[in-house]
Image (cartoon, grey):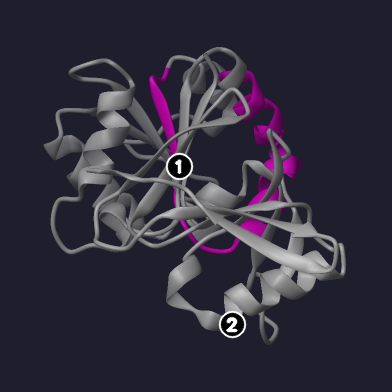
Amino acid sequence: MRRILAIGGGGFLMEDGASPVDALVRDLTGRAHPKVCFIATPSGDLPAHLDKFHHAFGALGCETKHLAFFRQPDARSIPVADFRAHLLQQDAIYVGGGNTKSALAVWRAWGLDGALREAWDAGVLLAGMSAGAMCWFEAGLTDSFWSEGYRPLDCLGLLPGGCAVHYSSDPLRRATLHAALKAQAVPPSLAIDDHAAVLLEDTSIGRVYAWRDGATACRISLEGDAVVERALTAQRL
């Protein structure tokens, strides 16, 4: 089954200690010591993000690698010249947070967008937080344009509809998404709070997870002239 774990916010990139959502990524592979590759393109392959990934997932017993387009290769990285074959050998691929627009441009220039779709079709678990959650959908609501506020962005389109992340942490994000829906600038969307994640099986919601009180995800759509939010029941991690 094709699966994507979309994380609204949290995990090793945002939390100080071990996070249950990182363990969830490992557990969803069904392996005790899975191969997990980190793609940190949204942060420009920030070394601190790479180090945090290897530390967090290494401590979980995973065999860790990363793919970096902006850094010199090292013993922890897979070769850029042959990333497709290596990605297809992974049990999970995790995309970090940062600038979604810039990451998508790099991926399309290198052909990584096609390789990610191929890995998804082959049953590799895809996961990601923030930009790494939005990127899989048809559209996202992002501040990646470095202008004031949030704007819609065309994404990879593996999953139908739109996605908004960090949903409960910024009232402006909610207001902008509602306005974009009313203007029909984005499709019906999945909004995910910090400390919540949604597992999508094929293209349908399979389960919602949360690891903080009050965190969840919701479906948001336009019905007539009104924006309607439907909260989803979350399983506590």
Percent position of residue 118, x then y: 64, 19
The answer to whether any part of residue 184 appears in the image is yes
For the point 35% across and 39% down, which residue is it? 74
For the point 31% across and 63% down, which residue is it? 214
The answer to the question of whether label 1 and label 2 lie on touching residues, with beta carbons closer than 8 A, is no
Which SS type dominates the magenta stretch? helix
Percent position of residue 217, x then y: 47, 53
Q: Earlier in the sequence, mark 1 or mark 2?
A: 2
Element under label 1?
strand
- Give the camera-side residue of 170 and 156: 170
For the point 20% across and 45% down, which residue is it? 20
For the point 84% across and 63% down, which residue is it? 185
Q: Which residue is mark 2?
A: 172
The residue range painted magenta reads: 90-119
For the residue marked with disc 2, what is the amino acid?
Leu
- Give the camera-side residue of 181 and 70: 181
Percent position of residue 230, x then y: 56, 54
Q: Which mark is residue 198?
A: 1
